[in-house]
Amino acid sequence: MPNEQTRQLKLGAMVIVLFSILLAVSLYVPIVSFITSFFIALPLAWYSAKFNRKTSILVTVVSIGISFFIGGLLAVPISMIHAVLGLVIGDAIRMKKSKLFMLLSTVIVLLATIVIQYVVVVLLFGVNPVKELLTIASNQYDQIGALLERYNALPNNYDNTVAEILFMFETVIPSILIISVFLLVIVFINILLPVLKRLGLVVPKFPAYRNMKFPKSILWYYMVVIVVTLFVELEKGTFAFMVFANATLILRVLLILQGISFIQFYIHQQRWPKWLAFVATILAFPLQSITFIIGIIDLGFNARLYVKEKNRK
């Protein structure tokens, strides 16, 4: 038992050092930092996959504390995000959870971490990052407007259009945050898991993206949201307006993702080249209106069954 505790402490110290080095390189070394930033969480993910949660949390807390001496106060929020990411991913591997559980739990914990950081910044420093961002954006729009006006190219109602854009951006920030964190976690998981597998860990797998299908209830939720926004006048700036605006954006993104899944499914069923699926996925984003409709058809009309039956014939 003492030998095991000594081993955990030695490996924990090694992990803290590796985490600190990767963080330092990511903060201070240009170009290379782009690559190392994806692997800062790797040492903690490996450690928390090997050892119990209590010890892993201790190593994580120490790693975050040391980050202050590496990059000052600004390095702490960055280290917290990567440290929590590694801790939750490794913990899910240790408990032999599915990749979906790993994804959702990491997203939830990371969102909670970001919200806590946001509240701390507002309360301790009196700075609201969202308001500051909107102020910067507003100033940029003012400069662009002044430039366009100088060349007599200022569109009609420019100020009203800009105000509307900034208002909508502020309204849907919660959903933008959720979607951004979700995509960020997917990227990190798909980068870290193959490396952790190389290090001898048994990692979970996602089924092929083409087989992903969201619950049909998402389509009904979207229809309810659309009906309410069409027939109920929601006053701008109210809590109800914010809820329905964010719900619309999130549900729309989910249906677009469903559409991309069906496109990949269809290409696979037709046995077309894999590069075509890649190209189609890239084109799905600029053609999101069409992709969105495909997602609705896939969920609402069970289009996959029709494709399968047609191929059997």
Image (tube, helix red, strand yellow):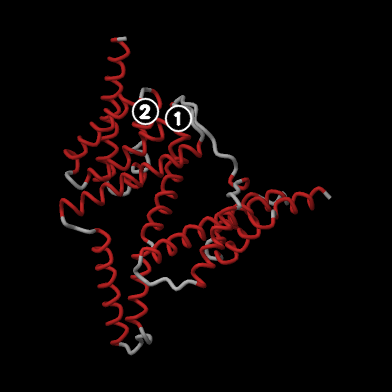
User: Which residue occupies 44% across, 50% down?
Assistant: 183
Residue 51 found in image quarter: top left
SS assignment at label 1: helix
Location of residue 113 by image quarter: top left
Upstream in sequence: badge 1 or badge 2: 2
Please name the residue that numbered disc 2 is placed on: 48
Q: Are marks 1 and 2 in contact (CB under 8 Å)?
A: yes
The residue lying at 17 percent from left, 44 percent from top is 72
Indicate the secondary structure of the residue bearing disc 2: helix
Q: Residue furthest right?
A: 313
Which residue is nearer to you in this view: 246 or 288? Answer: 246
The kind of residue on which mark 1 rests is: Ile
Residue located farthest toward the front when viewing the structure as drawn: 232
Where is 92 relative to 277, above or below?
A: above
Q: Nearer the viewer, residue 174 or 139?
A: 174
Q: Nearer the viewer, residue 76 or 15?
A: 76
Front residue of this view, candidates 218 and 195: 218
The residue carrying pointer 1 sits among few (fewer than 14), some (14 to 19) or many (20 or more) residues within 10 Å by Cα, namely many
Residue 81, how many percent across, how many down?
A: 31, 43
Residue 271 on image: x %, y %: 72, 49
| Relative image position of residue 185 (x, y in whole percent) | 42, 45
| Residue 137, numbered label | none
Quarter placement of the N terminus? top left
Which residue sits at x=32%, y=81%? 159
Identify the residue shown where x is 28% and y is 25%: 14
Three-letter amino acid code at disc 2?
Ser
| Residue indicated by mark 1 | 93
Q: Is residue 34 left or right of residue 129?
A: right
Q: Is residue 57 left or right of residue 175?
A: left
Quadrant of residue 189 within the rendered picture: top left
